[in-house]
């Protein structure tokens, strides 16, 4: 394994984390915030998912079994997906501006943001992060990557359900109209209608 293979994903995720941290102070004050217990229900699974992807020195037998070939093609395909996901999350974070929060909150003078990336999906930061998790999993090519993506997806869906309940309470019909117009996580893919019998 060459130096690029060893450090690229650490650098990508590290740069993303540094950007996130720098912007974290530039947010509105909160008037309502989820409890620590609620926050831990989505943070802890994401920590586990990140740990599974943490690097070649982690050993997760039998999850370190290879399911994709370790080739330049799979490595760079994973890198491209990771970069695309992180950039999409960054764009969404920049667009939402001072309304952003790491936990589920209602901000002072909270605005319902529906433009930019939020016109494609209601939760573009999560969409970007899931794409980045998937890209890193492709580059690793092991079962631990699959498990990490599934855990991240479950944690994110859990968090966004709380967020959407709060947004409905805050914005009412405006948020319902947004839900009807814009898909949750995957652009152009709305929930399939239920079959009636």
Image (cartoon, rainbow, N blue to C red):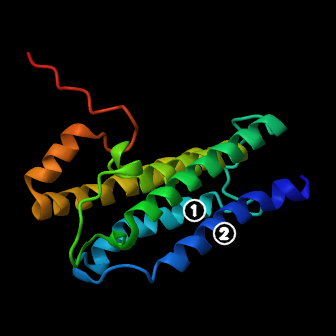
Find the residue positioned furthest to the right. 2
Residue found 55% across the figure and 79% down from its top:
22
Residue found 29% across the figure and 58% down from its top:
113
Mark 2 touches mark 1? (CB < 8 Å): no
Q: Nearer the viewer, residue 65 or 127?
A: 127
Q: Nearer the viewer, residue 59 or 191?
A: 191
Q: Is residue 62 left or right of residue 113?
A: right
Q: Quarter of the image holding residue 30? A: bottom left
Q: Position of residue 184 (x, y in %)?
A: 32, 44
For marks 2 and 1, give the one nearer the viewer.
Answer: 2
Report the Cα–Cα distance between label 2 and label 1: 12 Å
Q: Position of residue 62 (x, y in %)?
A: 66, 49
- For disc 1, the marked residue is 50
Q: Position of residue 132 (x, y in %)?
A: 58, 51
Q: Which mark is residue 101?
A: none
Of callouts 2 and 1, the N-terminal one: 2
Q: Is residue 146 left or right of residue 158?
A: right
Q: Nearer the viewer, residue 128 or 118?
A: 118
- Secondary structure of the residue carrying tag 1 is helix
- For disc 2, the marked residue is 14
Q: Is residue 63 left or right of residue 122?
A: right
Residue found 45% across the figure and 63% down from its top:
93
Say if 49 sits above or below 188 in the image: below
Q: Give the number of callouts.
A: 2
Q: Residues within 10 Å of mark 2 (few under 14, many from 20)?
A: few
Q: Nearer the viewer, residue 186 or 152?
A: 186
């Amino acid at each position: 394994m060459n130096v690029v293979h060893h450090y690229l994903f650490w650098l990508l995720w590290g740069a993303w984390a540094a950007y996130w941290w720098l912007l974290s102070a530039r947010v509105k004050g909160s008037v309502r915030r989820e409890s620590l217990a609620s926050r831990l229900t989505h943070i802890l699974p994401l920590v586990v998912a990140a740990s599974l992807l943490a690097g070649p020195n982690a050993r997760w037998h039998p999850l370190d079994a290879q399911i994709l070939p370790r080739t330049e093609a799979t490595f760079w395909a994973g890198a491209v997906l990771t970069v695309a996901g992180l950039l999409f999350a960054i764009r969404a974070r920049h667009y939402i501006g001072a309304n952003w929060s790491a936990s589920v909150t209602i901000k002072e003078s909270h605005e319902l943001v529906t433009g930019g990336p939020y016109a494609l999906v209601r939760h573009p930061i999560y969409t970007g992060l899931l794409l980045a998790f998937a890209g890193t999993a492709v580059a690793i090519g092991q079962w631990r990557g699959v498990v990490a993506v599934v855990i991240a997806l479950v944690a994110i869906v859990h968090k966004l359900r709380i967020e959407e309940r709060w947004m409905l309470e805050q914005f009412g019909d405006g948020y319902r109209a947004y839900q009807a117009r814009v898909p949750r996580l995957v652009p152009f893919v709305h929930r399939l209608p239920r079959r009636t019998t």
